Image: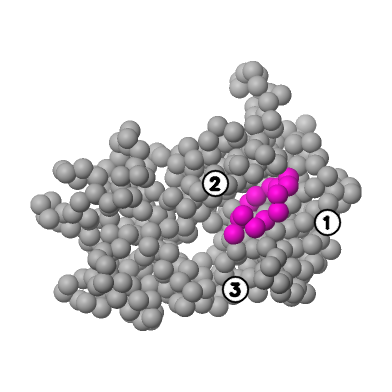
Amino acid sequence: MRTLLRLKRLMPEVQWIMWQNRSCSDSSIRSLESNTSILKHLTSKITATGPISVAEYMREALTNPVGGYYVKKDDMLGAGGDFITSPEISQIFGELLGVWCISEWMAAGKSSIFQLVELGPGRGSLASDILRVFSQLKAVLGETDISVHLVEVSPKLGQFQAECLTGDKTQTCNDDQPAYRSGTTRTGLPIYWYRRIEDVPRGFSVFLAHEFFDALPIHKFQRTEKGWREVMVDIDPESPEKLRFVVSHSPTLASGILLQNDESREHVEVCPEGGVIVQKLASRIAEDGGAALIVDYGHDGTKTDTLKSNLFLWQGFKGHQLHNVLEAPGMADLTADVDFSYLRKMTGNEVTCLGPITQRSFLKNMGIDSRLQVLLRSCHDSSTRAQLLHSYDMLINPEKMGHRFQFFSVLNRGRLAQYKGMQKSTAPLPVAGFAELNVE
């Protein structure tokens, strides 16, 4: 699904790097339409100020207010869009995450206030499945004050979410209010939309980030004979209408600030925005209680060997197919694998982190097999049964999503304080999904 692009290193003395164009088919590349407004904007900026960072390129391509992918794209999700996420594949995925949210709320002491906060909620499918679980478990939640808070910068996706979760029964908020949209969910809960995490009210919250961090801008670095240098985006002198990757001739501010002194890899990606966001989540969880569950493509700083062989974790998607990341900026989603070891470092010492573990392990621990059997027993339509089995396979098969997605959690330190001192061999971590489910 997501394929690594091979780096071709040219003459070391000039330190140029260029990526070869790769595609699942030549026809898919030819079918791409150039987003001329973004491309002209980028080439003008580069002409005026010089090569830009990968982070700046990524930010413009995805969130430029005029032609950014997430701003202007009508529908990038689902079978007819550019990519499909786990919630669109099977309702079981969202249901199990709903159970996880309630499990953490209960384990943390059943706070009287329970805020469900999702970062980058897509079409709203995940939140919809979770809210259905909340509705089914009303007896467990009791009189808890539950509310839903969505952090979304895309107006198009915000419309999809409003339709999915409220039947589009929402209203625009005044400019002096933190939320820009509000309403009531189909299950009767208050729901709000924000552009920034800072605007979400303080209080006990369970934060969900599913395929959110991988779309945040990254800085790219390469170790050279003269030290660390940043990978930049420049205009191709042989084709002025095209962009290319180059390596800076001298250190940049980012290369001096973002790299760790003990870094041993040859090529490194750093996502400072991801670090800032996870710090904000950690601060809220430490002060207000709650938890965060981050689900994404990623690794735990373990892809050293891959990086040393000059394979970059840098991808672009269009119509479910790979395309050159510098072609038609604004027309395709751009992502980079999440380095969970970096996120863990950025959370600090006031919270506890678990994972990453594979999606297969997490869903198995949450009881996906039992849930599948319940659905199969109540389903007598052969095509629906086949679809349930196909979706299950997509989610947990190691060759599909099972090992490609990782689950990572940030918890309040008090959440596990009572278990401090227990031997791991005799007492598995009492956090749903990160330990085997006890069905006895």
Q: Secondary structure at mark 3?
A: helix
**Label annotation for residue 135:** 1
Place residue 228 in its image quadrant: top left
Q: Residue furthest front?
A: 176
Quadrant that contains the C terminus = top right
How many labels were placed on the picture?
3
From mark 1 to mark 2, how far is it between C-alphas?
29 Å
Query: Residue 155: which numbered mark, if any?
Result: 3
Q: Is residue 159 visible?
A: yes
Q: Does label 3 or label 1 sit earlier along the sequence?
A: 1
Image position, residue 240 (x, y; %): 22, 77
The residue pinned by badge 2 equals 278
Mark 3 or mark 2: whose residue is earlier in sequence: 3
Cα separation, mark 3 vs mark 1, equals 28 Å
Name the residue located 27 percent from the left edge and 51 percent from the top edge: 252
Q: Nearer the viewer, residue 351 or 366?
A: 351
Q: Position of residue 164 (x, y in %)?
A: 71, 70
Q: Position of residue 203 (x, y in %)?
A: 73, 47
Residues rendered magenta in the picture: 196-208
Query: Residue 197 sits in which quadrant?
Result: bottom right
Of discs 3 and 1, which sits in the foreground?
3
Residue shown at 81% from the left, 61% from the top: 189
Q: Please say whether residue 193 is one of the residues in the magenta stretch.
A: no
Q: Of the residues under marks 1 and 2, which one precedes in the sequence?
A: 1
Residue kind at label 1, given as amino acid type: Ser
